[in-house]
């Protein structure tokens, strides 16, 4: 019994916490690129150090308190029904220090159309190399 409990505890200790977004809250890069090209882009916040997608508002790496405060101020100026897309692109989602705090802030502020740009690898691989628009 003690061995089973210890095994369960160890297995649970190494589990990654659940991501705060659902699959439905991931924005496809091709869809966002088309909306930018059609001048119908949502509000886009750049929350990382990787580069600026065309039309995005640069916030900075949201692992810092200053960037989180700036993001909060920008979000407070928007209607809660506004489609807001955040992205970082510094590294794979599983290692990114920026996407989780920023996405959690979107949820805490009550945004019903908050999205995370689906850049599972990084901005270069999942956006730039595909020729999508940059500033």
Image (tube, grey):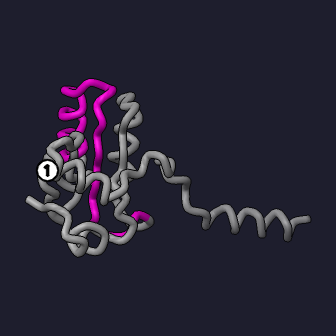
| Residue at the front extreme of this rendering | 38
Task: Tell me the quarter of the picture where residue 16 sits.
Answer: bottom right
- The residue depicted at 36 percent of the width and 45 percent of the height is 115
Q: How dense is the environment of label 1, judged by Cα within 10 Å: few (below 14), some, or many (20 and up)?
A: some
Task: Tell me the quarter of the picture where residue 9 sits.
Answer: bottom right
Is residue 31 toward the left or the right of residue 35 in the image? right
Q: Residue 24 magenta-drawn? A: no
Nearer to the camera, 39 or 55? 39
- The residue depicted at 22 percent of the width and 58 percent of the height is 48
Q: Residue 85 magenta-drawn? A: yes
Give the residues in magenta: 66-93
**SS at circle 1:** strand
Is residue 127 toward the left or the right of residue 39 in the image? right
- The residue depicted at 19 percent of the width and 26 percent of the height is 77
Residue 28: image x %, image y %?
36, 56
Is residue 133 toward the left or the right of residue 112 in the image? left
Q: Is residue 19 visible?
A: yes
In the displayed structure, 34 sits above or below 94; it is: above
The quadrant of the rendering that contains the C terminus is bottom left
Q: Which residue is mark 1?
A: 58
Nearer to the camera, 12 or 41? 41
Residue 126: image x %, image y %?
31, 69
In the displayed structure, 21 sits above or below 128; it is: above
In the displayed structure, 123 sits above or below 65; it is: below
- The residue depicted at 28 percent of the width and 54 percent of the height is 87
**Count the marks: how many?**
1
| Residue at the left extreme of this rendering | 135
In the displayed structure, 106 sits above or below 33; it is: above
The quadrant of the rendering that contains the N terminus is bottom right
Q: Is residue 59 visible?
A: no
Residue 101: image x %, image y %?
36, 48
Nearer to the camera, 43 or 28? 28
């Amino acid at each position: 019994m003690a061995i089973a409990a210890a095994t369960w505890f160890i297995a649970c200790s190494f589990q990654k916490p659940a991501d705060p977004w659902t699959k439905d809250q991931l924005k496809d890069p091709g869809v966002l690129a088309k909306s930018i090209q059609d001048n119908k882009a949502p509000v886009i916040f750049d929350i990382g150090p990787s580069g600026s997608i065309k039309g995005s508002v640069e916030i900075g790496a949201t692992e810092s308190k200053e960037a989180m405060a700036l993001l909060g101020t920008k979000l407070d100026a928007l209607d809660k029904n506004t489609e807001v897309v955040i992205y970082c692109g510094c590294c794979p989602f599983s290692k990114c220090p920026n996407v989780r705090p920023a996405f959690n802030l979107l949820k805490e502020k009550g945004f019903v159309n908050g999205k995370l740009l689906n850049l599972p690898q990084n901005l270069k691989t999942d956006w730039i190399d595909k020729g999508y628009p940059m500033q």
